[in-house]
Amino acid sequence: MLLMVLMAMAQLDRQILSITLEQIGTEFSLSDTQLGLLSGLVFALAFCLVGFPVAALVTRVSRRRIIAGSVLIWSGMTVLASTAQSFAVLLVARIGVGAGEAGSVAPAHSLISDLYPPERRTSAMSVFASGSNLGVLLAFLVGGVVGQIYGWRVAFLVAGVPGVILAIVLARSLPDLRPQKRPEADVFARTLGLIRQDSGLRFLLAAMAITGIVTFGGLSWTATFLIRSYGFSQLQTGLLMAGVVGIGGAAGTLFIGFLADRLGHRDQRWRLRLVALVIVFGKPLAFVFLLGPGGLIGMAAFVAGALFANAFWGPTFAYAHSRVPADCRPMITVILLFLFNLIGVGLGPTLVGILSDAWTTQSETGLGWGLAVAQALGVLGAWFYWRAAACAMSPQNET
């Protein structure tokens, strides 16, 4: 439960920017491309650069201390963002948030894999991942309600302060199991060697990278799309996104995680096949929402598609951890997140912003087309998931 709260706080501080992009862009006179860089690339670079050294430390240093310290850093940087008087300060704050969050995920995944056996790991990872949806719920509630009434700066402050309290709680209460065995000197090189030998992991890495573009392109820009194209206020958008992506998405993530474990008990391949099918079936709904007639039809498509948008989280990391020994799990987590964030966070929001600027005319916004291009890439991600699933029956390290 504590780790689920950890994920929720991380997503709150990460996604608070999404619902306030329009306000920030107006105050600082920023283009969609600049907003895409702010919500994407700078965060992703910091996350990726810090993630690898942290993963190398996980098997040597207290995971509890790493996680608590990371929460303190990203929360402080969110508070700093609330004081920004220039685009440059916002960039620095977002770099800090990315660096802080990088120190939490690998240690958390390592703890989960140590605490749960393989047959329960997918559902356990999905419970952890559902915190992401709860964090999105909080981000859109705080950003939508507080942001509209008091402004984006107060919204950032409200988002950042609870993390300081959480850091103290984690430092006192989080389990801190010791590594099962002493790690080899270069766990990074060893993990890369395992990836080279395992086509299933290679397909999984490709799937995660492509899925990241869809996930973060959508999360960063959907709220702005609702405001521009559906005529919602910031408050209405925040409440809608909180309910649909937060509550509905959390339920969908949990459902897929438990269903994947149930199906996987009979045939391991269905843990990832289920992810691939969910992704493919969600694409027509996304296109209706983004390019369709709008109104109730568009909103119904949005609600239905958002329920299972994060279904890939639990099965992805459970599969990866089942293919490597325990001391390599933090590093395989970081390698997956490196691609997910560098390509997904780095390219997704930025790509959508660039396409939006390119296709926008005086009478029509191009944001819907930019988001649709990102969604279309998800079909390729589903294909990679299906290929990874085909490798699930090959003998690997199921521990």
Image: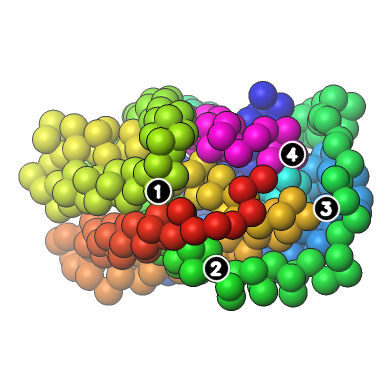
Image position, residue 112 (x, y; %)? 69, 37
Looking at marks 1 and 3 on the same chain, the residue that comes earlier in the sequence is marked by 3
Q: CA distance from mark 2 to mark 4?
A: 22 Å
| Magenta-drawn segment | 111-140
Q: CA distance from mark 2 to mark 1?
A: 15 Å
- In the rendered structure, which amino acid carries the disc numbered 2? Asp
Q: Which residue is mark 1?
A: 269
Q: CA distance from mark 2 to mark 3?
A: 24 Å
- Per the image, label 4 sits on a secondary structure element best described as helix
Looking at marks 2 and 3 on the same chain, the residue that comes earlier in the sequence is marked by 3
Q: CA distance from mark 4 to mark 1?
A: 23 Å
Contact (CB < 8 A) between labels 2 and 1?
no
Left/right of residue 185 with respect to residue 301 in the rendered view: right
Please report the residue visible at 27 percent of the width from the left and 33 percent of the height from the top. Answer: 303
Compared with 362, 145 (above or below) is above
Compared with 67, 394 (above or below) is below
Q: CA distance from mark 3 to mark 4?
A: 13 Å
* Colour scheme of the rendered structure: rainbow
Please report the residue visible at 83 percent of the width from the left and 71 percent of the height from the top. Answer: 186
- In the rendered structure, which amino acid carries the disc numbered 4? Asp
Left/right of residue 217 with respect to residue 106 in the rendered view: left
Circle 3 crowding by C-alpha within 10 Å: few under 14, some 14–19, many from 20: many
Magenta highlight on residue 275: no
Q: Which residue is mark 2?
A: 198
Q: Assign the magenta stretch its main secondary structure.
A: helix
Q: Which residue is mark 4?
A: 114
Total marks in image: 4
